[in-house]
């Protein structure tokens, strides 16, 4: 059994029994792909609209400036299970998984609906603009 999980926000391993580890696990469970999933006898709704935010794996001022905006947007949609904002450090293995998305600059924000890429966000970097884009797909 595993006792630690990778925290994509810090790049460090954290205990799955700690507060941060539980938060990371909860986030991973919220973004399962494939409709409904059975977990311990409980039904878990998976999101049908999600923003994928690809951060640079190296120091990047634009990524750093976007971080508080993303965090606030995540807080504002936390009670809407059909909507998720997921952040990822763009390591080579992550980029290999998303080669069809043609990620060439950071940060890159992509809207997925039902697991399919719909559009890339190029609008104003505000909480309201990100949430509106997530909900409607319009910039």
Image (spheres, helix red, strand yellow):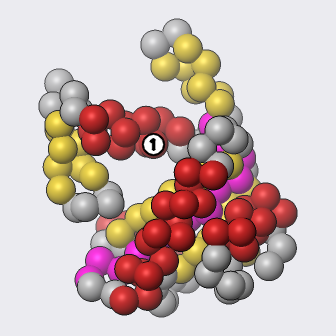
Dot 1 alpha-carbon crowd within 10 angstroms: few under 14, some 14 to 19, many 20 or more: some
Task: Where is residue 54? Give x, y as percent.
Answer: 46, 73
Q: Quadrant of residue 45?
A: top right
* Residue 131 visible in the snapshot: yes
Residue at the spot 55% in from the left edge and 19% down from the top edge:
38
Q: Is residue 124 above or below residue 90?
A: below
Task: Where is residue 8? Give x, y as percent.
Answer: 32, 58
- Horizontal side, residue 43 vs residue 95: left or right: right
Range drawn in magenta: 46-58
- Horizontal side, residue 9 vs residue 34: left or right: left
The kind of secondary structure element at disc 1 is helix
- Horizontal side, residue 15 vs residue 119: left or right: left
Residue at the spot 45% in from the left edge and 42% down from the top edge:
27
Q: Is residue 54 above or below residue 124?
A: above
On whether residue 47 falls in the magenta region, the answer is yes
- Horizontal side, residue 2 vs residue 63: left or right: left
Pointer 1: what residue? 27
Task: Where is residue 100? Give x, y as percent.
Answer: 57, 74
Residue at the spot 37% in from the left edge and 39% down from the top edge:
23
Foreground pick, 72 / 135:
72
* Residue 120 visible in the snapshot: no
Foreground pick, 76 / 49:
76
């Amino acid at each position: 059994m595993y006792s630690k999980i990778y925290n994509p926000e810090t790049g460090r391993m954290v205990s799955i029994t700690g507060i941060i580890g539980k938060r990371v696990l909860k986030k991973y469970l919220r973004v399962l792909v494939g409709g409904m999933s059975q977990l311990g006898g409980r039904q878990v709704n998976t999101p049908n609209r999600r923003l994928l935010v690809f951060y640079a794996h190296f120091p990047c001022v634009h990524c750093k400036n976007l971080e508080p905006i993303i965090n606030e947007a995540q807080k504002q949609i936390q009670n809407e299970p059909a909507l998720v904002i997921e952040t990822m450090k763009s390591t080579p293995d992550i980029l290999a998984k998303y080669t069809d998305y043609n990620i060439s600059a950071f940060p890159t924000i992509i809207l997925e609906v039902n697991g399919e890429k719909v559009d890339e966000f190029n609008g104003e970097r505000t909480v309201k603009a990100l949430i509106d884009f997530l909900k409607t797909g319009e910039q």
